[in-house]
Amino acid sequence: MYVETSSRRTFAGAIDWPGWCRSGRDEALALEALAAYTDRYRAVAAEAHIRFPAAAGRALEVVERQQGSATTDFGAPGAVLERDHAPVDAREVDRLAALLSASWRILDRVVAGAPPELRKGPRGGGRDRDKIVDHLLDAEAAYARKLGVRLNAPAADDTDAVAAHRAALLGSLATADPGASRSKGRWPVRYAARRMTWHVLDHAWEIEDRSP
């Protein structure tokens, strides 16, 4: 596991399992939240047809700690790890892409089964279903630029355009240069996969939890 900590929030995430990442007020609470989501993430690995360790979540070892940033404070895991700059072979890129693709399929099923209007938060906040989907597509278009690709966010109801948008993102993972981020401000492939998969699953689980 890795941990990134800012003044307001701490994220704990699995380095090799993109999307298995939760936050808390401190490291202990973040790791507790991560462990609590083990079975939820196990379903993602199953969707991707990737074996998930049976003992996952029982003993979490932190092997890297990073100082968080304004992104962390805002509510997203923003730390690029030292390990993220290591070379990534084609087999590992395929594995990361399979987990991202699985997260999209899970999101699509959750969205299809959710009502347009979701339960509000304790202070009456929170986007409704369609606004969340639009937000995800907009964010992914921005993420693509961090991988050297320019995409326009498709309309959520244009299934062909959404499929093409996702295919382009997967293609950008396959062609990403692990070392480019140091000199060009781009994301290395491991971080890009973690960030994108986390974002999709975070909102898929939010829709599930806020559906009546």
Image (spheres, rainbow, N blue to C red):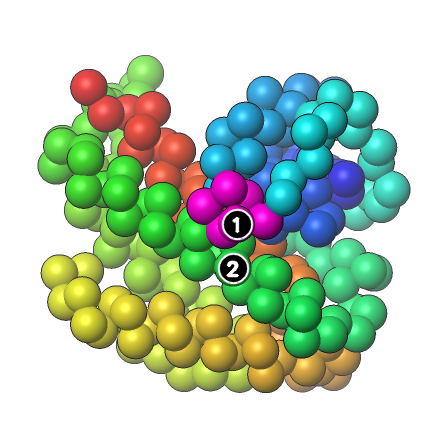
- Say what amino acid the circle numbered 1 marks: His
Identify which residue, 139 or 18, lies in the foreground: 18
Q: Residue furthest right?
A: 63
Give residue 156's position: percent from left, percent from top.
Answer: 19, 60
Question: Was residue 140 drawn as part of the magenta stretch in this picture?
Answer: no
Q: Secondary structure at mark 2?
A: helix
- Of the numbered discs 2 and 1, the one sitting upstream in the chain is 1
Give residue 206's position: percent from left, percent from top.
Answer: 36, 32
- In this rendering, position of residue 21 left or right of residue 138: right
Q: Residue at x 37, y 53 (%)?
A: 104
Quarter holding the C terminus is top left
Q: Secondary structure at mark 1?
A: loop
In the picture, the disc for residue 49 is: 1
User: In the picture, residue 209 is in which quadrant?
Assistant: top left
Q: Residue at x 59, y 68 (%)?
A: 94
Give residue 5's position: percent from left, percent from top.
Answer: 73, 38
Quarter holding the N terminus is top right
Q: Residue at x 47, y 72 (%)?
A: 170
Identify residue for label 2. Answer: 98
Q: Residue at x 55, y 34 (%)?
A: 42
Mark 2 Cα shell of 10 Å, populated few (<14), some (14-19), many (≥20)? some
- Say what amino acid the circle numbered 2 marks: Ala
In the picture, the disc for residue 106 is: none
Magenta stretch? Answer: 45-50
The answer, for residue 13, to whether it is visible in the render is no
The residues tagged by marks 2 and 1 sit, at their Cα atoms, a distance apart of 8 Å
